[in-house]
């Protein structure tokens, strides 16, 4: 794997970070490269994953886990982030149980096989991603027409903004997706 900065050595990480990474490895069967790439700076790793978890594991509101991953996949494609498109696209396919959805939203969410509600959500996310200075009341009204409230708009904005940071870190560090991500959610898991 080509990366600009060396991945952290799991054995040399602080106990809390090592425990979290081992938990992820136990659940997924591998260690996503982002965990080791960012672990070279433990304080930043903790802050990054605390905010990640607050946004992506949040209970309540009108955004499902699939919606959240769809926002990440779509906006990460706009930011040309291979790592996040592949990794979060895999998670999106699993949550939505649709093997083509990640590719569709990454290329053109307006032609993807998604609901009008999800399309409105992604229209808003893409405006935040590419032209946040142009967001107006009409953009919030378009979301409200599909059942989203101002708190949901905040969540869409925060996810888009957070992954803008993540996309830039992944791009500048040349972070590559783990090979395991490419097939997740495309074919049934071997038992």
Image (cartoon, grey):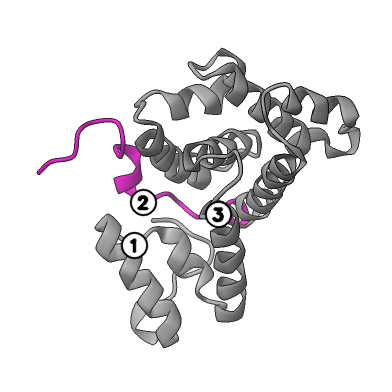
Q: Which quadrant would residue 130 be assigned to in this image?
A: top right
Residue 45 at least partly seen:
yes
Residue drawn at 62 percent across, 57 percent down: 169
Horizontal side of 112 relative to 169 (left or right) equals: left
- Location of the N terminus by quadrant is bottom left
Residue drawn at 65 percent across, 39 percent down: 79
Residue drawn at 67 percent across, 23 percent down: 146
Q: Secondary structure at mark 1?
A: loop
Q: Nearer the viewer, mark 1 or mark 2?
A: 1
Q: Nearer the viewer, mark 2 or mark 3?
A: 3
Seen from the viewer's position, the closer of residues 172 and 84 is: 84
Q: Label 2, on which residue?
A: 178
Q: Earlier in the sequence, mark 1 or mark 2?
A: 1
Horizontal side of 100 relative to 3 (left or right) equals: left
Callout 3 crowding tier (Cα within 10 Å): few <14, some 14–19, many ≥20: some
Q: Which mark is residue 74?
A: none
- Location of the C terminus by quadrant is top left
Q: CA distance from mark 1 to mark 3?
A: 23 Å
Q: Is residue 145 magenta?
A: no
Q: Nearer the viewer, mark 1 or mark 3?
A: 3
Callout 1 crowding tier (Cα within 10 Å): few <14, some 14–19, many ≥20: some
Seen from the viewer's position, the closer of residues 6 and 142 is: 142
Q: Which residues are magenta?
A: 170-191
Q: Which quadrant would residue 29 be assigned to in this image?
A: bottom left
Horizontal side of 67 relative to 31 (left or right) equals: right
The answer to whether marks 2 and 3 mark residues whose Cβ atoms lie closer than 8 Å is no
Q: Earlier in the sequence, mark 2 or mark 3?
A: 3
Q: Label 1, on which residue?
A: 31
Callout 2 crowding tier (Cα within 10 Å): few <14, some 14–19, many ≥20: some
């Amino acid at each position: 794997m080509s990366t600009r900065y060396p991945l952290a050595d799991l054995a040399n990480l602080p106990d809390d970070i090592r425990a979290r990474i081992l938990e992820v490895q136990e659940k997924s069967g591998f260690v996503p490269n982002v965990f080791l790439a960012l672990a070279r700076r433990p304080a930043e790793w903790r802050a990054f994953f605390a905010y990640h978890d607050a946004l992506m594991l949040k209970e309540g509101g009108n955004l499902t886990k699939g919606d959240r991953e769809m926002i990440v996949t779509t906006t990460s494609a706009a930011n040309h982030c291979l790592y996040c498109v592949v990794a979060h696209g895999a998670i999106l396919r699993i949550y939505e149980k649709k093997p083509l959805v990640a590719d569709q939203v990454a290329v053109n969410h307006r032609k993807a096989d998604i609901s009008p509600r999800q399309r409105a959500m992604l229209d808003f996310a893409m405006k935040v991603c590419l032209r946040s200075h142009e967001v107006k009341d009409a953009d919030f009204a378009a979301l409200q027409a599909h059942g989203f409230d101002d708190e949901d708009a905040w969540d869409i904005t925060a996810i888009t903004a957070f992954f803008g940071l993540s996309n830039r870190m992944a791009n500048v560090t040349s972070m590559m997706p783990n090979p395991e991500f490419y097939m997740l959610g495309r074919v049934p898991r071997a038992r």
